[in-house]
Amino acid sequence: MDDCIFCKIVKGEIPSTKVYEDDTVLAFRDLEPQAPQHILIIPKEHIASAAEITDKNSAVVAHIFETAAKIAHDLGFADGFRVVNNCGDSAGQSVKHLHFHVLAGRDFTWPPG
Ligand code: AMP
């Protein structure tokens, strides 16, 4: 997707602070962190949102959660973290490329609001 900022990050056209990368996913620090640790994990393939996950592309979601656990262990917050996906405008999705927020380093409230 030519006008997608996360596709541009995948292609290296926009800089990011990478935390992890492999053939199918990229993890990088959020520009506006909402916690001491705030990392975004995205598929390299453009998937617009969680509403677009099907039996054809869902394997990458499992890999994203494997990546979240790996990052949590590597960065030392495996004892407590939150994974968030905002899907659609009403849920606050501002970037229309599937991404999971991994937040840690403070206490979180529930419900999230
Ligand atoms: P959401 O509101 O769930 O769509 O989350 C999008 C997230 O992307 C927000 O937390 C933004 O701060 C973050 N973001 C937007 N542009 C960039 C960027 N160039 N590098 C890192 N994070 C970004």
Image (cartoon, rainbow, N blue to C red):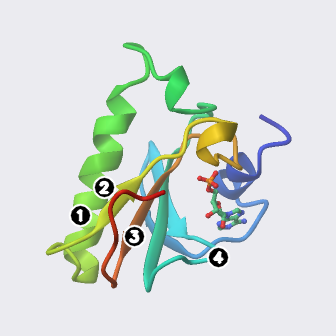
**Distance between mark 2 and mark 4 Cα atoms:** 21 Å
Q: Position of residue 70 (x, y in %)?
A: 23, 63
Q: Which residue is mark 2?
A: 67
Q: Which residue is mark 1?
A: 70
Mark 4 or mark 3, earlier in chain: 4
Q: Residues within 10 Å of mark 3 (few under 14, many from 20)?
A: many
Q: Which residue is mark 4?
A: 32
Of labels 2 and 3, the one closer to you? 3
Label 4 beta carbon within 8 A of ligand 1 = yes
Label drawn at residue 103: 3
Q: Quadrant of residue 16?
A: bottom right
Label 2 beta carbon within 8 A of ligand 1 = no
Q: Residues within 10 Å of mark 2 (few under 14, many from 20)?
A: some
Instruction: Report ligand 1 position as a quadrant.
Output: bottom right
Q: CB of mark 1 within 8 Å of CB of mark 2?
A: yes
Q: Is residue 52 above or below residue 1?
A: above
Q: Is residue 20 left or right of residue 43?
A: left
The amino acid on which the numbered mark 2 sits, given as a three-letter code, is Thr
